[in-house]
Amino acid sequence: MTGIGPLLSTSPLLPDLSGWAVQAARPDRLAGAAGLLLPHDGLPVADVRGHPERWETLALVTGALRRGVPVLGWGSGAALLGRALGAAVTASGSAPDRSALPRGAHAHAWAGTHPLHWTLDRAVAWAEPELPPALLAAFLAALPGWAGRRPGSPLESVGGAAAVREVVTAFYARARADALLGPVFAAHVADWPAHLERVTDFWVTLLGGEPGRAAWRGNLNAAHAGLGVRGAHLGRWLALWDATAREVLPADAAALLSARAAVMGERLGGAARAGSGTSQAGGT
């Protein structure tokens, strides 16, 4: 179907999806996906010790639910969907593992003590391995009305790594010219392109990370130790960061960055008070 993104699937064991493009499910494809399919694959869900790839799938499903991506699971896929929503899952011998009814879900049909068909917001589950064609058709028909998405992480809510880089670059252009902060940066930063990249990596990691981008692995307190920066510098850093974010980003995104910076400043300030009495913020 044209007009909305492709369907993602965790398995090639699919019913007829004529007219729909289907791609292998990956975290970096969730943002543009019309929906996520979790077909029955016969693998266990209740006990995944022999199937570590199940944890990756569960993380994928959780990410889809967090974004508001519609999810349809059947058989073992329904059990995975239930587990991702916090429901207990029990092994059922030769039958697929079964999920209890997730909190807040509506059961449309039962098979003994287990829900056969249940829904929760944009999550749809059918506990048996064979998916009824009518249920699939109803899910597909609902997708255009479920096109809206939520940010998958704080990073996405501020506009992604590109927005972070724009704020970082604008901030340091001002900070280098600032009478109080400029001398500190001049004394401790020799390679500005590398510095801006490190600080961008730090903020991207702090805000939830980006698929395919290496996470920042440094130690915040160690990175700021011995710079001779005091409370006045920290206060100026926070004020300048806040002003820059508010000029570059929409109000909600700027407020998020300022709030994260304030928490970081408290941590750095506390560490400085417990140690040498000096501090700084900003990843220099």
Image (cartoon, rainbow, N blue to C red):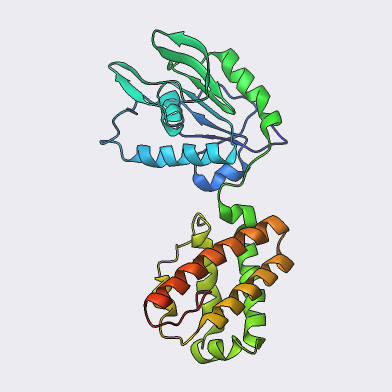
**Horizontal arrangement in the rendering, residue 272 relative to residue 63 (left or right):** left
| Nearer to the camera, 88 or 217 | 88
Q: Position of residue 275 (x, y in %)?
A: 37, 79
| Nearer to the camera, 227 or 120 | 227
**Horizontal arrangement in the rendering, residue 30 relative to residue 177 (left or right):** left
Q: Quadrant of residue 186?
A: bottom right
**Horizontal arrangement in the rendering, residue 56 relative to residue 69 (left or right):** left
Q: Identify the residue at horizontal 56%, vertical 66% (top origin).
A: 262
Q: Position of residue 21 (x, y in %)?
A: 61, 34
Q: Position of residue 85 (x, y in %)?
A: 46, 31
Q: Position of residue 282 (x, y in %)?
A: 53, 74
**Horizontal arrangement in the rendering, residue 110 relative to residue 166 (left or right):** left
The answer to whether residue 159 is seen in the rendering is no
Q: Quadrant of residue 259?
A: bottom right
Q: Identify the residue at horizontal 73%, vertical 36% (top origin).
A: 3
The number of discs equals 0
Q: Quadrant of residue 122?
A: top right
Q: From this view, report whether residue 141 is shown above or below residue 61.
A: above
**In the rendered image, which quarter contains the N terminus?**
top right
Q: Identify the residue at horizontal 60%, vertical 53% (top origin).
A: 156
Q: Identify the residue at horizontal 43%, vertical 17% (top origin).
A: 129
| Nearer to the camera, 57 or 171 | 171
The answer to whether residue 142 is seen in the rendering is yes
Furthest toward the left, the residue is: 50
